[in-house]
Structure formats: C-alpha cells, structure tokens
Image: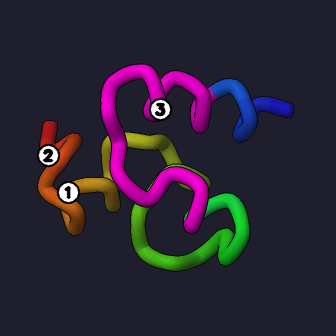
Amino acid sequence: MRDRFKIVRLQLQGCVGWRETVENGERGYGVRREGDYGVRRDGVLSR
C-alpha cells in the first residue's frame, strides 16, 4: 500500500508514466523504489 501512496503523490506532482511503473513495476521510473530516484529518466522528477 505504500507504493500506491507514492504513486498518487507522483501523479499529483505531474509524473509522466506513473501508471506504467505500476503495471511493469520495474520499468525504470523509480516509483517502486523511492519515487525520486529513477523518475529522472522521464525528466519530470529529476530531483
């Protein structure tokens, strides 16, 4: 349930591909890890 909360947080921040991360889990967005780690791949949440 923690991942879901983080995913929603990213969605509010404007993370593109947050849904793809949930479906794939390990797509490289980083939502499953921390949310601000691999998201820089999209360039939306670089920090």
Amino acid marked by disc 2: Ser
Amino acid marked by disc 1: Arg
Quadrant occupied by the C terminus: top left
The residue indicated by pointer 2 is 46
Amino acid marked by disc 3: Gln
Q: Closer to the camera: disc 2 or disc 3?
A: 3
Q: Residues within 10 Å of mark 3 (few under 14, many from 20)?
A: some
Lower position in the chain sequence, tag 2 or tag 3:
3
Give the magenta range.
Answer: 6-20
Q: Does the magenta run of residues contain 7?
A: yes
**Circles 1 and 3: CB distance less than 8 Å?**
no
Is 27 or 19 nearer to us in this picture? Answer: 19
Determine the CA span between mark 2 and mark 3: 14 Å
The residue indicated by pointer 1 is 40
Residue 41 shown left or right of residue 29 in the figure? left
Label 2, secondary structure: give it.
Answer: loop
**Location of residue 45 in the rendering, given as x and y in whole percent from the top left corner:** 22, 41
**Circles 1 and 2: CB distance less than 8 Å?**
yes
